[in-house]
Amino acid sequence: MPRALTLALAVLVLVGVSEAQSSDRIEIFGGYSYVNNDFSLTSRNGMQGWNALATVNSPYHLGLTADLSGLYPGAKVYTFLFGPQVSFRLKRVTPFVHALFGNTLVHYNGYLTSDSSFSYAAGGGVDFDITRRLALRGQADLLHTNFQTFDSQGGSVPPNVARICIGIVFRFWERN
């Protein structure tokens, strides 16, 4: 029993020390999203919309991210993704990578049907600090779904697309 108590006390002390070193506990991102089936991004057959993320950071550069997005015109595409994110905070720049998993829901225009599919996004980006609580973010992902959707010209978009997002990051609960 004394070993278990000592181990529990050591874990509590380490968590407390590491929590004190976590500089930005919660991050909220909101911005513009562009998806294109041409990875060179030279084709104009993409979809545009919004992207919102919430990340709860823990010590040791690891966080848990929830990613929601909506893409238009043509089919209305909504993604709901969750997963780990690894960030490396430098002076005014924070690069990150993430692997997100979840679901994509599509409502087809002109049809009374919708469809959903397992999806994932793998990628990353970089935050450029404007102030202690505000940053500008650029992000790029490979977004994969298990079905084909329709773009505004009626053509099909392959299940693997490039997703580019830009926007603003708000940080809460800073401890310095």
Image: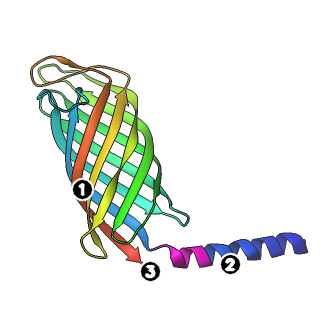
Q: Please provide percent x and percent y for residue 33.
A: 21, 44
Q: Which mark is residue 13?
A: 2
User: Which residue does the numbered mark 1 point to in the structure image?
Assistant: 30
Please, what is the three-letter code of the amino acid marked with disc 1?
A: Gly
Are there few (<14), some (14-19), or many (20+) residues within 10 Å of tag 2? few
Residue at 22 percent across and 52 percent down: it is: 166
Work out whether 79 lies above or below 118. Answer: below
Determine whether the residue tagged by mark 2 lies in a helix, strand or loop: helix
For the C terminus, the quadrant is: bottom left
**Is residue 9 in the magenta section?**
no
Q: Main secondary structure of the magenta part?
A: helix
Q: Which mark is residue 175?
A: 3
| Front-lying residue, 93 or 175 | 93
Please, what is the three-letter code of the amino acid marked with disc 2?
A: Val
Residue at the right extreme, as displayed: 1
Residue at 40 percent across and 75 percent down: it is: 173
Please, what is the three-letter code of the amino acid marked with disc 3?
A: Arg
Q: Which residues are magenta?
A: 17-22
Residue at 63 percent across and 72 percent down: it is: 15
Q: Please provide percent x and percent y for residue 119.
A: 39, 32
Q: Which quadrant of the figure has residue 2?
A: bottom right
